[in-house]
Image: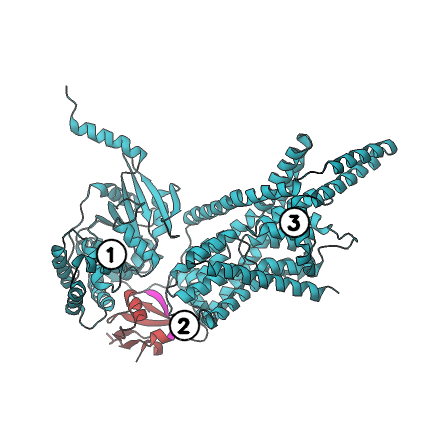
Amino acid sequence: MRPDPKTTRVSVERIAVRRHAAATVVVVGNPNSGKSTLFNRLTGLRQRTANYPGVTVEKHIGTVRFDDMALELVDLPGMYALSAHSLEERIAVDVLLGRMSDVRPPAGILAVLDTTNLYQGLYLLQQLLTLHLPVVVALTMSDAAQASGLRIDVEALRKRLGGVPVFPVVATTGQGVNALRHALHEIPHSTAPKLPTLWRELSDASELLAREMPVTVPRIEIERALIDHDSVFYRELVERMGEGGTARIDAIRTQLFGQDPPLASEARHRYSWVREVLAEVQQKAPAIVTWGSRISSWLNRPVPGTIGLFVVMALVFQAVFAWATPLMNAIDQGSAALGSLVAAMLPQGAVASFVSDGIIAGVGSVVVFLPQILILFLFIIVLEDSGYLARAAYLMDRVMRSVGLSGQSIIPMISSFACAVPGIMATRVIPNRRDRIATILAAPFMTCSARLPVYALLIAAFVPAQRIGWVNLQGLVLFGLYVLGIVAGLLTALLLRKTALHGPKPPFALMLPEFRRPNPRTVFIQLIGRAMIFLRRAGTVIFSVAVVVWALAYFPRSESIETELQFRVTSAETSLSGEALRSSVVVLRNQAAAAQLEQSLLGRAGKVVEPLFHPLGWDWRISAAVIAGFPAREVVVAVLGTVYAVGSEADESTLAGRLKSAAWPDGTAVFTLPMVIGLLIFYACCLQCAATLAVIRRETNSWRWPVFAWCYMTTIGYTGALIAYQIGTP
Amino acid sequence: MTLDSLQRGRKYVIKGVNSADPVVQRLMVLGLVEGTEIELASAAIGGDPIEYRIFGNAISLRREQARQFAVSLKAEG
């Protein structure tokens, strides 16, 4: 009996799709529409983040599994329109049109509309419908809409949209998500909806032009070419039309838009349709005053809002330092214990030193600060998710404008408190180029999480844990360093906007989302994602630098120092015994280790540059650590850990203790308060991060800015440290 | 009357937009077009930027951009 060809094909498909997603569905929506929460709800942890080729816009891809197949979901950056003004919008349009080389042409669209903001959602949806792809609409935050008295006639909306399926969902609880999943499952077998009549004149004109083309050009491309004056689509269309193309398009534009700018005409047309639809499908009961709206209206008032912002910032910094301490102590002691345990198990020599002083001490002294970094990320994610960051941009606009920036620069700057790399990437939302570059150059001054280990180490060791009133002195110094970074960054922006980046003040407009309770699930997924990015950096860059630095500090080994050590230990054994012998051997070992380090490659390098750093009160060890820390500043703690574990008295097992006992040859302490303050200023200002330099190069598309930033920041750091040490030291 | 001189607690309708300015065109894409109802919500310290409510959502504008929009009081009833 011949097998039924139909069944065979189906089963082959089933096998194939178990391994690969059957099709790609693109998730599109306004910023703050709950798009990411829904994406996380649908894909769970089955997602990955990469960059689109050649640019640094993040590509979020997740998988939705069904019993018989899987779908790939691509989460596009939030946007208001397909007008391709920003880099993100251009990439979104390319993905939607299947022009992006590493994303399959989409089989359909999941349009995410915030029920409480259908106005802007429907604007974008109109443009999406022109793409001629199957569309599924999710109305998010339907619970919030209901609570505020909004009623949506889903069936009427569906009709107005040409019959596309519409699903009210609550992404945070998962309500309605099952029905949505069923609809997504049908996408690969669906056809595009019949386009509702949205703007007849534009449709007719582009239909006419499409028929004249020698090849099939998607309707949306023609529409965008007509509307967006200088877009890629416009240039392509002119090229396809050949001679007389420009004149022809101009004629059509005049006919369609008259003297009105096309974009303005589009906005008027589309919003009048939106108003018409909303009048039909949306009913609004009188607004109920909720707990959230009362808080937000209070926080929106100028003075309480600004005070609130400072309270939030202070709370974050206090928490980052205070809450993490117990965990950090535990990790610190654990890593020290592990190091000595492993060292005792291995035969003495290069391998034991490599494992305990290279690997365990190096990575351990970075991992110990993970609790702090997680707390910081947690706060930033919660603030972002609750809608507070946009509020901060609004409140800070006036301040940012006084240094020639806009409130939009505040989000990249606040992100830079975690890491300058995502912060600099986030400057893409700033439309003005001068504004953007000024923000990029100010961002690395913000205290990033990689600076925290250095700050935390030096503060814990050298700033007394006193209380002044209710304020912890250590917390106060940390806060001061944050302020220093902010002031230096803002002054830099001001300076640049007055000189090299002189130009008109940029515009500013911002949607302010309602405050909402952050969804624990979304916060958790994002926290894991960001922690992994940090760990990947810590695990690769820091680890390899730590190992290289250990090697530089360990090699070459001097035979004569070892021979002399053996000789002295033997002679001590003949004259001493018991406790006296043991302590004498420890002293001899430490002296030998110090001698070994001093003649190692790193010790020699430190001595070569020591004269340069001597005016700052640094000895060759610190100079060596600073040099080693230039590719990645977070390595400095690992380097200090390695340097002092090898070369200094090993009485205290923690690095902080080791630093306290470091001394000049004449016995005076190296780490005096003025020197430590200088060192902190140096770290606050210097651009010791290869990743940041690379991202500045990429974002400004020139070597000029990263080179300038590096020289400028190093000069400021050096000068600051010099002043602090010279003034503070009698 | 332009958007920078609204009174709190009253409803207005946008009547005219100075759409020649590309910056203003971007604001139009966000929904600030003729016919949109708008209310004053608040302002940052110093009265700038200004926060408005349009279609139940909050948007903030700088004073100089707010001047590009002509408004009139919404007819009661």
Q: Amino acid at mark 3?
A: Ala
Residue A123, above or below A357:
below
Q: Which mark is residue A627?
A: none
**Residue at 24% in and 47% down:** A108
Q: Is residue A511 magenta?
A: no
Q: CA distance from mark 2 to mark 1?
A: 33 Å
Q: Position of residue A416 (x, y in %)?
A: 49, 57
Tell me the magenta residue range.
B55-63
Q: Quadrant of residue A84?
A: bottom left
Would you name the residue on which mark 2 appears? A505
Q: Position of residue B58 (x, y in %)?
A: 35, 66
Query: Nearer the N terminus, badge 1 or badge 3?
Result: 1
Would you name the residue on which mark 3 appears? A605
- The chain drawn in cyan is A
**Residue at 25% in and 41% down:** A185
Q: Helix, strand or loop at disc 2? A: loop
Chain under label 1? A
Residue A105, above or below A287:
above
- Label pair 2/3, CB-CB below 8 angstroms: no
Whether residue A292 is visible here, answered yes or no, is: yes
Would you name the residue on which mark 1 appears? A125
Whether residue A298 is visible here, answered yes or no, is: no
Q: CA distance from mark 1 to mark 3?
A: 62 Å
Q: Nearer the viewer, residue A610 or A304?
A: A610
Q: Nearer the viewer, residue A462 or A154?
A: A462
